[in-house]
Image: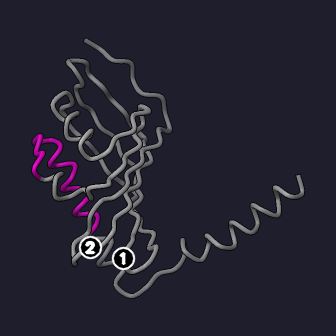
Amino acid sequence: MRLLFVVALLLSATVAPLASAQTPGDERLLAELTALERASWEAALKDDKDFFRTYMAPEFKGLFADGTVAGREDFLRNMDDFHLVKYSMGDVSLLRINEHAVMVLYRAGFEGVHKGKKLSQSGVESSSLYVRRDGKWLEIFYQETATSPPAPPSN
């Protein structure tokens, strides 16, 4: 028990400075990446695979609220079966890892249809990790954590 407390204390001491560090330009960067994140949701509404081919890093990995784990190509193939109907984003914040890696954290909700069945999820804690390559931000990792159980599929 004591070892667990010491480990937790050490972790909080190393992570806390990252979470609270604000550097000049973070507000502008938050606005830029929030717009990029919204653009990805808008592209999903339009079933725009071309957007995701240039938005996601080739080695992209996503962990979704329903338990799905997908790479970029898996995500693109799944777009044939999933159609987003609407989404919401709120409480957006930024966690700067370094000058080339930034995480955007926010609460999301969405409704869609997967293989003909309606899906609805609200209160999803979402995070996107972006890396800067050749002056462009690419999403390399995305994770959703459901804070409430998904609504049962309906016909």
- Front residue of 66/108: it is 66
Element type at mark 2: strand
**Magenta region includes residue 48:** yes
Q: Which residues are magenta?
A: 33-50
Compared to residue 5, the image places residue 42 above or below, namely above
Instruction: Give the amino acid at mark 1.
Output: His
Q: CA distance from mark 2 to mark 1?
A: 8 Å
Pointer 1: residues within 10 angstroms few (<14), some, or many (20+)? few
Q: Position of residue 99 (x, y in %)?
A: 38, 80
Badge 1 element: loop
Q: Is residue 23 above or below residue 151?
A: below
Q: Which residue is mark 2?
A: 133
In the rendered image, residue 111, in percent from the top left (x then y), is placed at 27, 32
Picture quadrant of residue 115:
top left
Q: Position of residue 87 (x, y in %)?
A: 26, 42
The disc label shown at residue 100, or none: 1
Which residue occupies the extreme top position in the image?
A: 155
Q: Are marks 2 and 1 in contact (CB under 8 Å)?
A: yes
Residue 63 at x, y percent in the picture: 41, 43
Residue most extreme to the right:
2
Query: 3 left or right of 83?
Result: right
Give the number of marks: 2
Magenta segment, prevailing SS (helix, strand or loop) = helix
Quarter of the rendering containing residue 140: bottom left
Relative height, residue 127 to residue 121 (above, below): below
Looking at the picture, tell me which residue is in the foreground, 63 or 28: 63
Of residues 93 and 116, which is closer to you in this image?
116
